């Protein structure tokens, strides 16, 4: 008998989420706005500037007690 350990995929609720995208065309880095600590973040992969945009993503809540953004 065959018993698969894989569980069936569950559809997670998604919403339009504000993100920061890397401006370097050769980099595909991005991060959610609610997980950014700087007012104007830089890419963690290539250190280029980032710009705000939106992306359809699964809903994730940031439960960090310190969610204030600082200037660099």
Image (cartoon, rainbow, N blue to C red):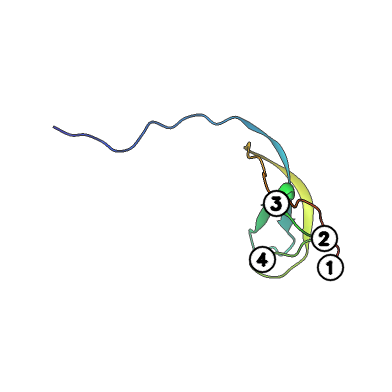
Which structural element holds mark 4?
A: loop
Q: CA distance from mark 3 to mark 1?
A: 16 Å
Residue at image mark 1: 72
Q: Is residue 64 above or below residue 46?
A: above
Nearest to N terminus: mark 4 or mark 1: 4
Q: Residue furthest left?
A: 1
- As rendered, which of 33 and 46 lies closer to the eye? 33
Q: Nearer the viewer, mark 4 or mark 3?
A: 3
Q: CA distance from mark 3 to mark 2?
A: 13 Å
Nearest to N terminus: mark 3 or mark 2: 3
Nearest to N terminus: mark 1 or mark 2: 2
Q: CA distance from mark 2 to mark 4?
A: 13 Å
Image coordinates of residue 55 in percent, x first then y, are 69, 42
Q: Nearer the viewer, mark 3 or mark 2?
A: 3
Residue at image mark 2: 40
Q: Is residue 30 above or below residue 45?
A: above
Residue at image mark 3: 35
Nearest to N terminus: mark 3 or mark 1: 3
Quarter holding the N terminus is top left
User: Do the residues under discs 3 and 2 have CB atoms within 8 angstroms?
Assistant: no
Nearest to N terminus: mark 4 or mark 3: 3
């Amino acid at each position: 008998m065959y018993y698969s350990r894989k569980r069936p995929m569950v559809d997670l609720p998604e919403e339009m989420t504000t993100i920061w995208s890397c401006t370097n065309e050769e980099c595909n880095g991005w991060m959610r706005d609610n997980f950014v600590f700087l007012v104007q973040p830089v890419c963690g992969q290539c250190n280029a500037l980032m710009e705000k945009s939106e992306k359809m993503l699964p809903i994730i809540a940031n439960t960090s007690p310190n969610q204030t953004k600082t200037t660099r």
